[in-house]
Amino acid sequence: MDNSIAGFPTVLVKTSSLRSIDGNLLLEALDTADRALLAPHVERREVGRGDVLFRAGDDVSHVTFPAQGCVVTLVVPLRDGKSVETATVGREGAIGGVVSQGYLPAFGQAVVQVAGPIIRIDADRLAEAKHASKTIRDLFVRYADCLLAQVLQSVACNASHTIERRCLRWLLTLQDRIGTPDLPVTHELLADMLGVRRAYLTEVLGRMQREGLIAIGHRRLTLPDRKRAEAASCECHAAVRHHFAEVLGAVYAPGGRMVAVDAAEPDRLKPPSTAVTLRDLAP
Ligand SMILES: [Zn+2]
């Protein structure tokens, strides 16, 4: 099995940090015993914008955890050359083999939208760790449920909501994951994410700027008033965020709720020491 990833630059990083899980909230939520299970199999890399982690049909050998401000999108390319975003994953999650454990070919394509560090774990080693630890298994069951919720809401949104509202949903989702007011988004990238022509998108963005919903800069967009953007967006962003808070809340916030997956055993999952609340994820 070829473990290489298309277009992946390998950069030199300090040996001491090569096995660090810092910067990914899912992994940081694990306790010392679970971290020790995964530590020998953790690899850190830097990825650049446009790098493809896997394509449809690829054997996904590793599960990828974006860290810090790195953001990866799962897109479905269509025969006419368009592609549409189905899920956007950053430091809150993981991509590739989350459910299939890497044994099945990838369905979509994973593309890096915001450059940064990623953490990779061999899918077979992660499957062994899930087998050995109930809490690791539990965390991934919860996360898989949240990822599915995100995909389901995308289907509904793409079918029913206006381009302006879909655009705001994606910008709010991105802002949650990178945590800065400035979003490194070009018109081209946004057109690809939304599956529309660039000229049409530019017209839509111009209208949104005149309404004060976004500010357009050089290769970036800003949401000047997040509350207004939330109000003008469709319900999809808030619905997915609410599901994350219900199912994985304690991973992101000390006071977060964690619904029981298996009520027979108390959860060992702990919020990370430098806990980031769902509210903190947005500036
Ligand atoms: Zn929507």
Image (cartoon, grey):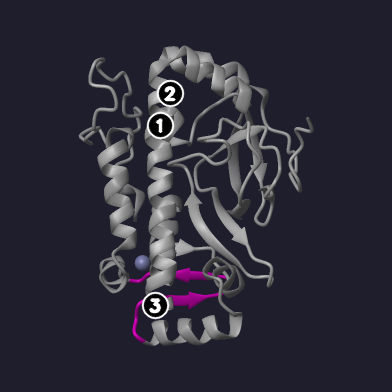
Question: What element does badge 3 sit on?
Answer: loop
In contact (CB < 8 Å): disc 1 and disc 3: no
> What is the x, y in percent for residue 215?
43, 76
> What is the x, y in percent for residue 113?
59, 56
**Which callout, 1 or 3, points at the residue further toward the start of the chain?**
1
The residue at 59%/46% (across/down) is 116
Q: Amino acid at mark 1?
A: Val
The residue at 54%/70% (across/down) is 190
Q: Quadrant of the N terminus?
A: top right
Q: What residue is disc 1 on?
A: 141
Instruction: Bin the neighbour count of mark 3 within 10 Å (Cα to Cα): few under 14, some 14-19, many 20 and up.
Output: few
Q: CA distance from mark 1 to mark 3?
A: 32 Å
Residue 42 in sight in this render: no
Q: What range of the chain is rendered magenta?
A: 211-224
Q: Nearer the viewer, residue 217 or 178?
A: 178
Residue 117, numbered label: none
Magenta stretch contains residue 69: no
Residue 137, numbered label: 2
Magenta stretch contains residue 221: yes
Q: CA distance from mark 2 to mark 1?
A: 6 Å
Q: Nearer the viewer, residue 242 or 252?
A: 242
Answer with left or right where residue 18 lies relative to residue 194.
right
> What is the x, y in percent for residue 174?
45, 58
Answer with left or right where residue 17 lies relative to residue 210.
right
Q: What residue is disc 3 on?
A: 162
In contact (CB < 8 Å): disc 2 and disc 1: yes
Question: What element does badge 1 sit on?
Answer: helix
Q: CA distance from mark 2 to mark 3?
A: 38 Å
**Which callout, 2 or 3, points at the residue further toward the start of the chain?**
2
> What is the x, y in percent for residue 141?
40, 31
Q: Quadrant of the C terminus?
A: bottom left
Q: Amino acid at mark 2?
A: Arg
